[in-house]
Image (cartoon, rainbow, N blue to C red):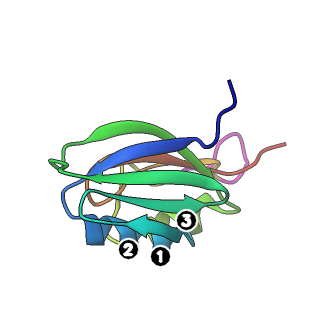
């Protein structure tokens, strides 16, 4: 079977806020938006944002690799997201992981390339 496209869908209680968060925070490109769903492309991947979310904390499985998770975590918080805890150094190396959530409670990870 030929797959034409892969999209990961998350839920949002406020579509405009969610689109702004994902586009502005991660240099996303809005592909389409209507009253039910928006699609934001980030680094070649598509995140679908579906309306009707309840704002409950939900693990998404989304992981975004960035150059610096401390700077990334700060950007997430500034944009209205939250952190489960501040990124911390490990084994004498700079932090490589930040556990985050968007304003709707969709949890995701920021990671730094290691090795």
> Which residue does the numbered mark 2 point to in the structure image?
20
Reply above or below: 82 against 75.
above
Reply above or below: 98 against 3.
below
Side of 63 where 38 appears, left or right? left
Q: Magenta includes 43?
A: no
Number of numbered discs present? 3
Q: Position of residue 69 (x, y in %)?
A: 60, 59
Q: Kindly report which numbered mark, 1 or 3, lies closer to the viewer in this rendering.
A: 1
User: In what element is the residue under mark 3?
Assistant: helix
**Alpha-carbon span between mark 1 and mark 3:** 12 Å
Q: Position of residue 29 (x, y in %)?
A: 55, 71
User: In what element is the residue under mark 1?
Assistant: helix
**Alpha-carbon span between mark 2 and mark 3:** 16 Å
**Which residues are the magenta region?**
87-94
Tell me what residue is drawn at x 19 percent, y 49 percent: 53
Which mark sits nearer the N-terminus, 1 or 3? Answer: 1
Q: Do the CB atoms of the residues marked 2 and 1 lie less than 8 Å apart?
A: yes
> Which residue does the numbered mark 3 point to in the structure image?
72
């Amino acid at each position: 079977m030929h797959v034409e496209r892969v999209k990961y869908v998350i839920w949002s209680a406020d579509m405009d806020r969610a689109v702004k968060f994902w586009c502005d925070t991660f240099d996303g490109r809005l592909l389409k938006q209507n009253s039910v769903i928006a699609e934001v492309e980030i680094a070649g991947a598509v995140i679908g944002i579906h309306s009707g979310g309840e704002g409950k904390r939900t693990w998404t499985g989304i992981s975004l690799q960035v150059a610096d998770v401390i700077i990334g975590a700060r950007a997430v918080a500034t944009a209205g997201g939250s952190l489960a805890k501040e990124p911390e150094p490990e084994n004498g190396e700079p932090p490589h992981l930040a556990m985050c959530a968007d304003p709707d409670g969709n949890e995701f990870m920021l990671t730094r390339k290691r090795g």
